[in-house]
Image: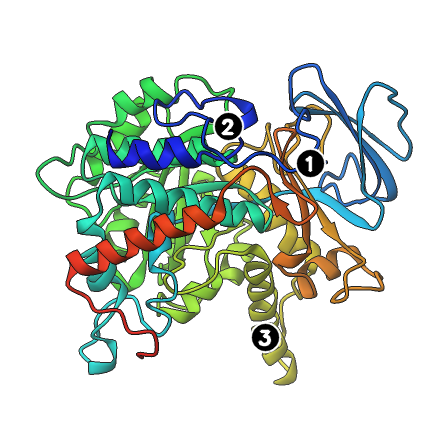
Amino acid sequence: MCRLCDISRRHLPYPNFGPTGGGMGVSAYATPVAEGVPEACGREGQRTLIKNGIILSMDDSVGDFEKGDILIEGSRIIEIAETISADDAIVIDASGKIVMPGFIDTHHHQFETALRGQLANAILINDGLPANAQNYYETVLQSFSLVYRPEDVYINELFGALSQLDAGVTTVMDVSQIHHSPAHSDAVVSALKDSGRRSVFGYFEGWGDDAQYPGDAARLREQYFSSDDQLLTMIMGGEIYLPFHEQSWKVGRDLDLPIALHVVGTFGMQPTFDGLGANGAFGEDNIFIHMTGMSDDGWKYARDAGAHISLSVPIEMQMRHGTPPIQKAIDYGMSLSLSTDVECTMTADFFTQMRAMVTMQRMFANEKALAGEEYPALLTARQAIRAATIGGAEGLKLDRRTGSLTPGKDADIILLDAEALNVAPLNNVPGTVVTLMERSNVDSVLVAGKVRKWQGKLVGADIAHLRGELEKSRDYIFEKAGIARSLFGD
């Protein structure tokens, strides 16, 4: 039995929902679902009633409720009102809980989970100073990533996905620059399926003799993503720093896939980006990640094409991508979302992302105000939540399925504890979510109506054993890359 299959067979989360169909997982060895978890939620025909919640819908047509109910049938929301009666429903008491759509991460390199914290002090590229000899481009992309086996990909992807589910992130675009072979790509898909959350498979580049990017995109699309009515969808990576990016864009558009790419001035991308924009290459199917250091012309091309902007504010500040262009995106009226980027440098929870966005935009605006200059409107907590939910859904072309609490959409819902020590008493719902809460406030999580976290604990996943598998993977990756681990090193 292959090592990857062994990990998956023994430790597949959510055993009661059956095999994923990816050929890598069966339920026989998974951790049993804890007593009291409403595991039937989300099944076809089963109704679930969330009662007495403080509802933050993020849908203007639905509105918000100081106390309200949400009725779900199978995977979808069918009604939201102050009071709903449904005698045949499983009832979830949401008293004292803020009930809102799950967070949506539009850019996360989950394959790097085993490298968490390793580059806490690092910048993006080597600037020649001894302190920056360990940097993201050389250390991760040119060293660590090259030694990953498919089984390393699987456990890194799975553990990172479960960690974000625990933090209330119900949807991710996984930017897996690890497609060194079709087996590596299959391992990514298998882990995303086994995690049980909504995921967008970002098919980006890989390296080595067995790499088949971008040509393997057609197989992956047909084998795993032929239906749009599933938790997993696909996006094509189209990095313009690669010499064959035109081919990648053509493949993506031939397959009717959105095209995502990093746009970072530090890498000298501005002339290429401007050239593509001037030639009319941009479209509504583009997701531009970071958008640091771009010209006004580049921004206008992106805006006029209806492209989406994904910002990773803490990482952009920390790793010298350039100043996060929050205000530019707002001023140009761009569709905007938040993303976590790399856990080798910064946490992947969304409370951190929202706070960073709000505080940075307000810092620059307040500086202008104190100098007696005209200043832009101060960003609000609700605007940050919008970027973290429906904004992300729009960017990933999933807004008809998720991103808000709306009848007809899938029930991707989180319950946040508003009575906890760190937030009580509750006075302002959006403000509490953005300025006071953190991952410990995530009480319960539903994805497409199924309970994935219940009353503070993930459902059905053997985290202790998965952690052990991740540690084994980490040790292998460090050894093969020739990089020594130092728990207290700089």
Position above or below: 351 against 252: below
Q: Quadrant of the rendered structure where residue 265 is? A: bottom left
Q: Secondary structure at mark 1?
A: loop
* Residue bearing the label numbered 2: 231
> Label 2 neighbourhood size at 10 Å, few (<14), some (14-19), many (20+)?
some
Give the image location of residue 119, x and y in percent. 33, 68
Q: Secondary structure at mark 3?
A: helix
> Label 3 neighbourhood size at 10 Å, few (<14), some (14-19), many (20+)?
few
* Residue bearing the label numbered 3: 363
Residue type beneath disc 2: Leu
Q: Nearer the viewer, residue 192 or 271?
A: 192
Q: Is residue 321 left or right of residue 142?
A: right
* Residue bearing the label numbered 1: 35
**The N terminus lies in which quarter of the figure?**
top left
Front of the two marks 2 and 1:
1
The answer to which of marks 2 and 1 sits earlier in the sequence is 1
Residue type beneath disc 3: Met
Position above or below: 252 against 445: above
